[in-house]
Amino acid sequence: AQTVTQSQPEMSVQEAETVTLSCTYDTSENNYYLFWYKQPPSRQMILVIRQEAYKQQNATENRFSVNFQKAAKSFSLKISDSQLGDTAMYFCAFKSVGGKSTFGDGTTLTVKP
Amino acid sequence: AAGVIQSPRHLIKEKRETATLKCYPIPRHDTVYWYQQGPGQDPQFLISFYEKMQSDKGSIPDRFSAQQFSDYHSELNMSSLELGDSALYFCASRRGLAGYNEQFFGPGTRLTVL
């Protein structure tokens, strides 16, 4: 079974600064997908960024980028130029090909003005 | 673009009652997943369906059952509700099982059991 670990229950960052959320996972599979989801107070699950395990290049979506270290099974999320609207719970998720998603416990990020 | 629709958005029930949650996937999506997210917890996978057949099963209690219909919508039936069933229930849909297709989440149904 796959496991996903987010070791930072809570984090805070000043507006316009950069913050990195950590995520590690455990799997015996070679091909899989990794996601970061954002869950604002409305509790809607919003996909932030995704990474295919077979791709070495780190995914980037505007202010969001990941540091994917396959050998270390690490998948951290970097948010640059943090904005107040980034305040939310962030979940790291592992998904096997065709399978369900396994979520980490989440990291509550607060962006301070 | 069309998104995953869940109904109702909010539901209040009493202990030992039954509840039915509905999920309407994005058009042409044939795979549906159900997740349960308790207060302050991460989403936990319950069950999934592909082409109207159960494709995977997670931590779904025996009191719950689910099915996917011919139009690909899915219903989660919950009986003998307990206080601990109070949670946000997400439905997600995707197209097919193989390959890289992300799950699209619905807005969730918030179930409160009194």
Image (tube, coloured by chain):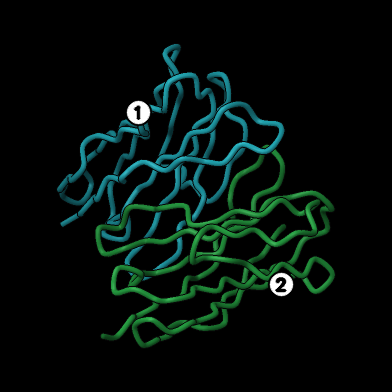
Chain colours: A green, B cyan
The amino acid type found where label 2 is placed reads Ser
Residue B48 rendering spot, x and y as whole percentages: 54, 36
The picture quadrant where one finds residue B97 is top right
Disc sitting over residue A71 in the figure: none
Quarter of the figure with the N terminus of chain A: bottom right
Where is residue A108, by image quadrant? Answer: bottom left
Q: Residue B74's spot in the image, x, y percent?
A: 40, 27
Residue B58, above or below B27? below
Q: In which quarter of the image is the C terminus of chain A?
A: bottom left
- Residue drawn at x 31%, y 39% is B79
In percent of width and height, residue A109 lies at 39, 78
Q: Residues within 10 Å of mark 1 (few under 14, many from 20)?
A: few
Q: Alpha-carbon distance for marks 1 and 2?
A: 33 Å
Residue B2 - label? 1
Which amino acid is tagged 1?
Ala
- Tell me the SS state at disc 2: strand
**Residue A74 tag number:** 2
Question: In front: B45, or B108?
Answer: B108
Q: Which residue lies furthest to the top in this view?
A: B70
Vertical position of residue A84 compared to residue B98: above or below: below
Q: Within the image, what quadrant is residue B17 found in? A: top left
Same chain, marks 1 and 2?
A: no
Q: What element carries label 1?
A: loop
- Specify whether B12 is left or right of A94: left
Q: How crowded is mark 2: few (under 14 residues within 10 Å), some or many (20 or more)?
A: some
Position of residue B15 in the picture relative to residue A62 (left or right): left
Q: Residue at x 59, y 77 (%)?
A: A22
